[in-house]
């Protein structure tokens, strides 16, 4: 036993979105640049919030700021094949949401990478940005993504 969680599969995620890779996403070694993985995580989370709420989440009185991110890499991704992003909520707290995002390319069932993405909600109207509860619109959008 290595102490690492098992490699995630498609069955581990609830919501799906497909993104198109671009020529510029690949680095000099011919695979997806590490920074692009984090852009995909951010896009998967925020696109879901926009779609599920029907709102520009940036205009809410409380906004989610990224407090933590990480990525586990399992195999290379790259241009020109599209990438399927799977999304699940690992934890829905009082003032934070922890997401896991799986990246898949091709027909395989195992993730090529998995990201962890933490939103902490803060007051969007205060310069001090105190931590506040997750807005009801956001809570309603992410509750269906939780796993028992």
Image: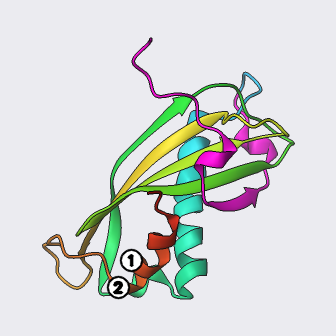
Q: Quadrant of the C terminus?
A: bottom left
**Residue 19 among magenta residues:** yes
Rendered position, 127 above or below 117: below
- In this picture, which residue range is highlighted in magenta? 1-27
Rendered position, 140 above or below 90: below
Q: How many marks?
A: 2
Work out how far the residue at label 1 is from the one at label 2, CA to CA, in angstroms.
5 Å
Helix, strand or loop at label 2? It is helix
Rendered position, 93 above or below 78: below
Residue linked to disc 1: 139
- Give residue 58's quadrant in the image: bottom left
Residue depicted at x 58% and y 61%: 43
Q: Quadrant of the N terminus?
A: top left
Residue linked to disc 2: 136
**Classed neighbour count for the residue bearing mark 2: other residues with Cα under 10 Å, few (<14), some (14–19), many (≥20):** few
Residue depicted at x 35% and y 85%: 136
Residue 67: percent from left, percent from top = 30, 53
Residue 15: percent from left, percent from top = 63, 63
């Amino acid at each position: 036993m290595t102490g690492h969680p098992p490699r995630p599969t498609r069955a581990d995620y609830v919501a799906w979105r497909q993104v198109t890779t671009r020529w510029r996403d690949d680095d000099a070694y011919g695979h997806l640049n590490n920074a692009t993985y984090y852009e995909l995580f951010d896009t998967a989370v925020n696109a879901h919030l926009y779609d599920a709420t029907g709102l520009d989440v940036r205009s809410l009185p409380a906004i989610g700021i990224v407090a933590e991110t990480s990525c586990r890499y399992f195999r290379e991704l790259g241009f020109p094949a599209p990438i399927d992003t799977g999304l699940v909520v690992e934890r829905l707290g009082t003032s934070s949401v922890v997401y896991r995002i799986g990246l898949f390319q091709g027909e395989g069932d195992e993730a090529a990478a998995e990201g962890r993405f933490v939103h902490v909600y803060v007051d969007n109207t205060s310069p001090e940005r105190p931590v506040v509860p997750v807005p009801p619109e956001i809570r309603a959008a992410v509750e269906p993504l939780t796993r028992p």
